[in-house]
Amino acid sequence: MTHSAKPDHCRLIIEPAPLPGSRNMAVDEALLESAANQDSCTLRWYQWDEPTISLGYFQKNVSEDSDENWKDLPRVRRLSGGGAILHHHELTYSFALPGSHPLAKTPPELYVAIHQPIIDVLAAHGLQVQFRGISFRSKSEPFLCFGRGDERDLVYQGQKILGSAQRRRRGAIVQHGSLLLLTSEHASEFPGLLNLTEQPERYQNDFLKTLTTDFSRAISQALNLPLKSQILTDEEAVLSEHLEKEKYTADAWTSRK
């Protein structure tokens, strides 16, 4: 099948309730498949129903620096690379883009295309964050992603509060990322944005809904892709259920590295 016309709109999916890690990762892969096969574009917002560690695609399911506070948490392996993320008090997005869109051909630019609108919206809410601007690597990379540094990370006073990762498939690309809003008791060394700005009381449903709406509108405008609120297609629902059962809950996948 040949695809050429870039999408003229982007689906918006806002999950109504937190979901298990296996479900979240299965849905993101199903959306990547739709981007690859049907030229569809989807922006999705979701949360996690319990503290969960998502492993980067190439990561081992063990760590010499495992902390007692999080070593026994449930784990799921992502399609994307990078370090493990402890998902807890955060807002998570995924953005699936078909290969027919110009940004799919320049993956680094997609990070900026999504992160800049997030910066702008947070600034409008009095939360001043910025790009890190430099990358740093160590001989032994920390197990958790928020201990690593990339120039496209969003930071507040030097503290990482948003990081994203990508996976390509047949020209299409899915990018997903986590906006750390509150510190997790399972990883107290990583402060959330609202802790850093001394506004933890803002972590409530109304504020999160407002952020989700504002982020979606800003991303839509930045990419010139009108949004249409929708849900998964029947085909995506079936595929994601299959992926969750056969892949993302299977130990052979989670512990394969």
Image (spheres, rainbow, N blue to C red):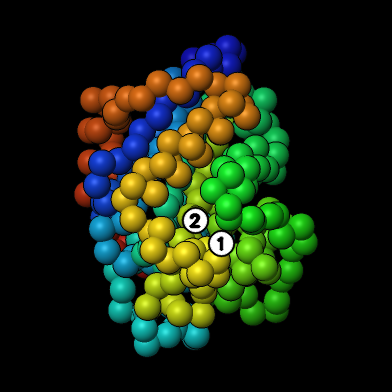
Kind of residue at disc 2: Leu
Looking at the image, which residue is at 36% across and 33% down? 13
Q: Tell me which residue sits at (61%, 39%) in the image.
A: 117
Q: Residue visible at 55% across and 66% down?
A: 197
Visible residue check, residue 97 = no
Query: Residue 176, image x and y in percent?
Result: 49, 47
Task: Classify mark 1: helix, strand or loop.
Answer: strand
Q: Secondary structure at mark 2?
A: strand
Seen as rendered, the residue at the extreme right is 134
For this view, does 187 lie left or right of residue 108?
left
Residue 211 percent across, percent down from the top left: 45, 44
Considering depth in this image, is 201 or 38 the residue closer to the camera?
201
Frontmost residue, 36 versus 192: 192
Q: Could you tell me which quadrant the C terminus lies in?
A: bottom left
Q: Is residue 239 above or below residue 247?
A: above
**CA gap, disc 1 and disc 2:** 6 Å
Residue matched to label 2: 179
User: Which label belongs to residue 161?
Assistant: 1
Tag 1: amino acid: Ile
Please state if 17 lies on the left or on the right of 96 as rendered: left
Eyeballing the image, is 186 above or below 93?
below
* Residue at image point 32% right, 67% down: 51
| Residue 12 rendering spot, x and y as whole percentages | 40, 29
Q: Between disc 1 and disc 2, whose residue precedes?
A: 1
